[in-house]
């Protein structure tokens, strides 16, 4: 009876080892998403459109700032010449304060608009790349693919760089 147990155990261990060897080890890959995005023509076009948009907002901001500076200089000049009454001085100072607040409000809104425009332009590109990465991972049996541009990996020596496969999937090669 003792002889059957060790043989059964040995057979079970061998069967387990064979089944483990039959399964392929998990594959891990890596790529530099930042470099991939930078090399894409769509990203370059989006960045150019974003720059035009940012430049238009900057021009408005500069125009508002220049108008404020001119109004301030005029107030200072008239005040120094004694051309303003105390009431007029207070009114003009209040107008300048309002103008300065409007500039600050515009700058905050401009930053929000710029962020929204960036998201609008880059979201379709990122979605396309994400779909390509998922397809490459599925087609090539990768368990995980790490983005080396974000530092989201600890060790990548035995991983495959899948950027060429993703570029091929995107039609870039």
Image (spheres, grey):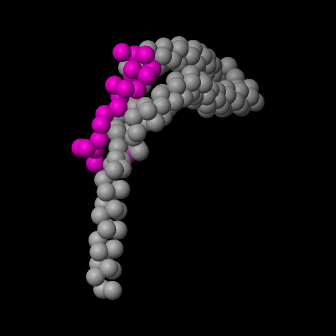
Q: Using residue 38 as the reference point, say whether residue 125 is left or right of it.
A: right
Q: Residue 27 falls in which quadrant of the image?
A: top left
For the point 35% across and 68% down, the residue is 12
Name the outermost residue toward the left. 157
- Image spot of residue 139 (x, y percent): 43, 33
- Image spot of residue 96 (x, y percent): 66, 27
- Image spot of residue 93 (x, y percent): 67, 30
**Would residue 120 be counted in the magenta stretch?**
no
What range is drawn magenta here?
A: 149-173
Along the line of sight, the residue nearer the viewer: 91 or 35: 35
Q: Using residue 158 as the reference point, say whether residue 32 is left or right of it.
A: right
Is any atom of residue 126 visible in this view? no
Along the line of sight, the residue nearer the viewer: 51 or 88: 51
The majority secondary structure of the magenta stretch comes to loop
What is the number of callouts on the image? 0
- Looking at the picture, does residue 82 appear above or below residue 17? above
Along the line of sight, the residue nearer the viewer: 57 or 46: 46
- Image spot of residue 114 (x, y percent): 57, 25
**Would residue 156 be counted in the magenta stretch?**
yes
């Amino acid at each position: 009876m003792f002889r059957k147990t060790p043989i059964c155990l040995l057979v079970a261990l061998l069967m387990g080892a064979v089944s483990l060897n039959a399964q392929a080890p998990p594959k891990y890959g890596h790529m530099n998403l930042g470099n991939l995005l930078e090399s894409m023509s769509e990203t370059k076009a989006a960045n150019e459109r974003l720059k035009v948009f940012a430049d238009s907002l900057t021009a408005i901001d500069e125009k508002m700032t220049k108008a404020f500076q001119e109004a301030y200089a005029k107030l200072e000049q008239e005040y120094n010449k004694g051309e303003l009454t105390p009431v007029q001085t207070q009114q003009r100072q209040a107008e300048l304060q309002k103008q300065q607040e409007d500039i600050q409000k515009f700058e905050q809104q401009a930053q929000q608009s710029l962020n929204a425009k960036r998201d609008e332009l880059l979201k379709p590109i990122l979605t396309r790349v994400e779909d390509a990465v998922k397809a490459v991972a599925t087609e090539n049996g990768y368990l995980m693919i790490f983005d080396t541009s974000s530092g989201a990996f600890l060790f990548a020596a035995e991983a495959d760089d899948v950027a060429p496969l993703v570029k091929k999937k995107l039609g870039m090669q």
